Amino acid sequence: IRYFNLFKMPNLPQDPRTLLETPRIVRTVQMGSGQYWHNGLYTCLEKSLSHVHNSMDIVLNFNIDGLPIHNNSKLQFWPILRSIYNFNTEPMIIGIYCGENKPPTPNEFLTPFVNELLTILNNGIIINGYKINIHIRCFICDTPARSFIKG
C-alpha cells in the first residue's frame, strides 16, 4: 500500500490491516479446556444485508460441525456457521470453539448463539431502517455433531 503513496494518495492507509479493519484484539472466552470466540449472528447478518433497502423475510440455514485443525494435532474447531437460504451470500462464522476436545457441554457452547437467535427470531432486526424478519430453515450437522448438540 505504501507504493500508492508515491502517487500522492495521502488518504490511503499505510497498512492493509487498517484498510480491512482487521481487529487488533480478538476477545475469546475460556470454555472448558478451550477458547470460544463469538462473532454474533446480528453482526453476520448486518454485514451480509448492508445493501438491503426494503423490509423482507430472511430464511437461515445453520451448520455446526467438529473438525480437526491438523492431522498431527489434537486441536479441533467447532464452528457455528450460518448461510442465508433465500439470498446468494457467503456463509459466515457466528462463533467458533477451539480446544483439544469438543466443547465441554452443548449448553455452554450454544448459549451465546441461542440467546441471540431467540431475540432476533422474536423481534427481527433493523438494517438501514428496514425491519428484517428471520426464520430458521434447518440445522445441518454430521452425526457426531448432531449427537453432541442434542445432548
Image: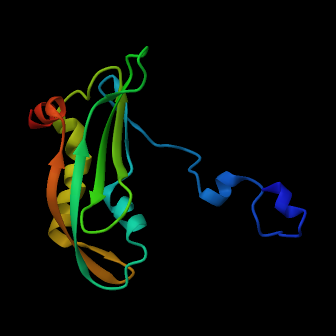
Residue drawn at point x = 43 percent, y = 22 percent: 70
Q: Give above or below for 138 relative to 101.
A: below
* Position in image of residue 45 (x %, y %): 34, 64
Q: Quadrant of residue 37?
A: top left
* Position in image of residue 35 (x %, y %): 38, 32
Q: Give above or below for 47 relative to 16.
A: below
Residue drawn at point x = 61 percent, y = 57 percent: 20
Viewport quadrant of the C terminus: top left
Q: Quadrant of residue 103?
A: top left
Residue drawn at point x = 89 percent, y = 70 percent: 8
* Position in image of residue 109 (x %, y %): 24, 37
Viewport quadrant of the N terminus: bottom right
Q: Give above or below for 115 relative to 12.
A: above
Q: In terms of depth relative to the viewer, which is nearer, 22 or 70? A: 70
Q: Residue furthest top?
A: 72
Residue drawn at point x = 42 percent, y = 65 percent: 47
Q: In terms of depth relative to the viewer, which is nearer, 79 or 83? A: 83
Q: Residue furthest front?
A: 88
> For this view, does 10 lie left or right of residue 94?
right
* Position in image of residue 85 (x %, y %): 24, 63
